[in-house]
Image (cartoon, rainbow, N blue to C red):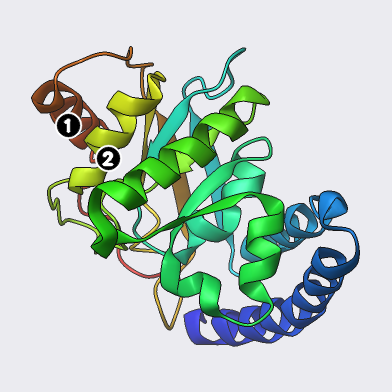
Amino acid sequence: MAAVRSVLFYAAFYGGSVLFVLAAVLVAMVAPARIRPVPDAWARFHRACVTHLLGIDVREVGRKAFDSPVLYAIKHESFFEAIELPVILDHPVGFGKVELFRIPGWGRAARAYGTIPVARTQGAKALRNMVSEARAYAATGRPLAIFPEGTRVPHGERPPLQAGFAGLYKMLGLPVVPVAVNSGPLYQPLWKRRGTIVLQFGELIEPGLPREEIEARVHAAINALNRPSPGPR
């Protein structure tokens, strides 16, 4: 049944995604300031496919909304949380590796929505550019969202955070909300499984902490759900 559900999901979601991508590229070209409804609708469409075709429920635990901008540090186990960002948060500003922005059309649409490129090989210069853009977005009240481990990590693994996270935290001066996610065991690359994906929002962490402390607290919090999951259903 997992294979059947997955095939139906791929047909519906990726078939529909073609239309959303074309719409996003078109809007980014003619009216980039009006692009928000398209990615937001795409993320909601994904949630509907996940819920109704894959049989995956999504449960949120903890406080996630705040009156002022915060930096959300999110565990990254699958494409689920990347696609779902506009559903999970209110008009978030994400960070993505610079290679993604070279994809024709997609890069332009992502920039129009408000996604910041991460050039890991450019060191301090890249960090300053990221901080400048992030500050500008935060000044408008938008939340920032980053995957501090830098890439997708298999469930059960706990790699150290990327060095850029602590630098970004220090230079932005924003509080951090760590978010644990257990999407990996269910939202697998091929055959996806039924079950419940939990998004656990941790306690707000104040700005200004030493690097060792902020990294330790965030690392522990985003891995709070990193434990064995039930088998396939």
Identify the secondary structure beneath mark 1: helix
Disc assigned to residue 166: none
Q: Which residue is mark 2?
A: 165
Say left or right for 24 vs 149: right
At a point 59% along the width and 79% down the height, the residue shown is: 5
* Amino acid bearing label 2: Phe
User: Pointer 1: residues within 10 angstroms few (<14), some, or many (20+)?
Assistant: many
Identify the secondary structure beneath mark 2: helix
Where residue 148 appears, as percent x and y from the top left, is 30, 46
Quadrant in which the C terminus is drawn: bottom left
Comparing 133 with 22, the one in front is 133
The answer to which quarter of the image holds residue 24 is: bottom right
Q: Which residue is mark 1?
A: 215
At a point 48% along the width and 37% down the height, the residue shown is: 132
CA gap between label 2 and label 1 equals 8 Å
Count of all numbered marks drawn on residues in the image: 2
CB under 8 Å between callouts 2 and 1?
yes
Instruction: Choose mark 2 or mark 1, whichever is in front.
Output: 2
Where residue 185 appears, as percent x and y from the top left, is 33, 63
Is residue 108 shown above or below 177? below
If you read the primary sequence from the N terminus, does the residue marked by circle 2 or circle 1 appear first?
Answer: 2
Where residue 181 appears, as percent x and y from the top left, is 38, 46
Residue 160 visible in the shown view: yes
